[in-house]
Image (cartoon, grey):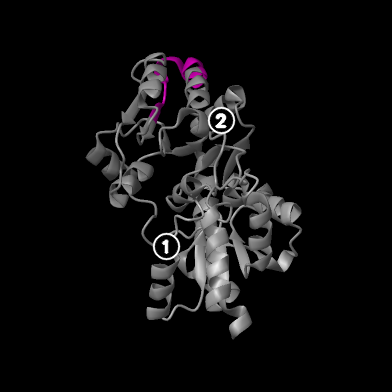
Amino acid sequence: ASYLATPLGPLAHELRADGCGAILCHEYEYPRFDVAVGLGRWLRLPVFATFQGAVPGGSLIQRPLRRLAVHAAAGLIIASEREAQRVRDRYRLPPERVAAIPNPMDVARFRPLPKDAVRAELGIPADARVVVWQGRVEVDKKGLDVLLDAWTRVCQQHGAHSPLLLLVGTGRDEDVLRQLIQAAPPATIRWVDRYVTDRELLWRYLAAADIATLPSRREGFAVAVVESMACGLPVVAADATGVVDALGEGEEAAGVVVAREDAGALAVALGRLIADDTLGRALGALGRRRAEEQFSLEVVGRRLRRFLWHDRG
C-alpha cells in the first residue's frame, strides 16, 4: 500500500509542467523515496533525498528495493555525521554521494533580544535564572522524564533560590508531563501548554531564557539546538543523533553534551551554567557565531546549490 500511495501520473504531469530539473525527496528510508527514484529514472531527472529522522525500513519488500534506490539516486543530503556514517556503511556508498548539509536557520530573524523587555512582556521575573525547553511533548523520545528528574535535583541544590524551568510546547503525552510537573518542586516550572506556531512568539520565549536544554533520547537533526544558539543561548543537551553536529565539539562547542538518560549528569551541567553566568554568556556567543557561520540561509543555500547542480554546471 505504501508503494501505491504516490500518484505517479499526476506527479509526473506536475513535474513536467513546472519544468523541474531535479526531485528532492523528504526522507530516504520510506517507500515514497523508492518510488521517486523510479519516477526520476523514467523522466530522466536526478533524485536526491534528505534526512529528517528516518529509521531503516524493515519489511522484506523494502530492504532490496531501498538498496537499489539508494544506489540509483543522485545523492543524499544528511545533516548528522552519525547518520551519514550509518548510511555509508549500510549501503556501501562512496563519500561523495553523501553531502553533510544541515538544516538552515534564518539567523537574521532569530537573534538575541533585550532580555528585560521580553521578560516583562511574558511575565517572567527579571532576576530569575531561566532554563528553556521547547518542542513536542513526547515524553520518552524527548527525554522529558529525564529532564524533570534532573530539574528536581537542580532545585534541591539551590533551595529557596531555585531557578525557573520554562517548557514550551504540547503533544500526545501532555497528561504524562502534567503528572511529572506535579511531582516536581512547586513554583519552579512554567509550562506553555500549546503548539507555538507563531515563530515570533517562540523567538521571544527563547530570548527570555538564560540556558536552553534538549534531553532527547532520539532526534533527527536538532533544530531546537540551532534555534537556541541563534538566540545566543548556551545549550545543555543529551548526545542524541545530530546534537554534536549542531553544537560543535571541543573548544568550539556552544554548550555541554551529556549522556542520554543520565539525569544526574544533566543536573550537574544545568547547575553549572545556572551558577556561572559568565560561562553561559561565552558559550552563547560561540553558539550565535556558529549559527551564523554554519546554519544561515545563505550558507546552507550555497552548499545545497553546489551539491544539487554540480554535475550539470
Q: Position of residue 244 (x, y in %)?
A: 62, 47
Q: Position of residue 179 (x, y in %)?
A: 38, 17
Q: Residue at x 53, y 35 (%)?
A: 216
Q: Is residue 11 magenta?
A: no
The residue where tag 1 is placed is 7
Numbered circle sitting on residue 77: none
Q: Position of residue 80 (x, y in %)?
A: 62, 52
Tag 2 and tag 1, C-beta contact below 8 Å: no
Q: Quadrant of residue 38?
A: bottom right
State how many labels appear: 2
Q: Residue at x 50, y 21 (%)?
A: 154
Instruction: Name above or below for residue 200 compared with residue 144.
Output: below
In the image: residue 293, left or right of residue 6: right
Helix, strand or loop: magenta stretch: helix
Q: Report the mark closest to the observer, 2 or 1.
A: 1
Q: Quadrant of residue 16?
A: bottom left
**Magenta span covers which residues?**
153-165
Query: How far apart, in angstroms, are the residues tagged by discs 2 and 1?
Result: 54 Å
Q: Residue at x 34, y 50 (%)?
A: 113
In the image: residue 77, left or right of residue 159: right
Judging depth in this view, the residue of 7 and 214 nearest the camera is: 7
Instruction: Name above or below for residue 134 compared with residue 285.
Output: above
The quadrant the C terminus occupies is bottom right
**Label whose residue precedes the other's in the sequence (2 or 1):** 1
SS at badge 2? helix
Q: Position of residue 57 (x, y in %)?
A: 61, 46
The residue where tag 2 is placed is 272
Which amino acid, by three-letter code, is at mark 2? Arg
Residue 303 seen anywhere in this rendered image of the structure: no
SS at badge 1? loop
Which amino acid, by three-letter code, is at mark 1? Pro
Q: Residue at x 69, y 64 (%)?
A: 71
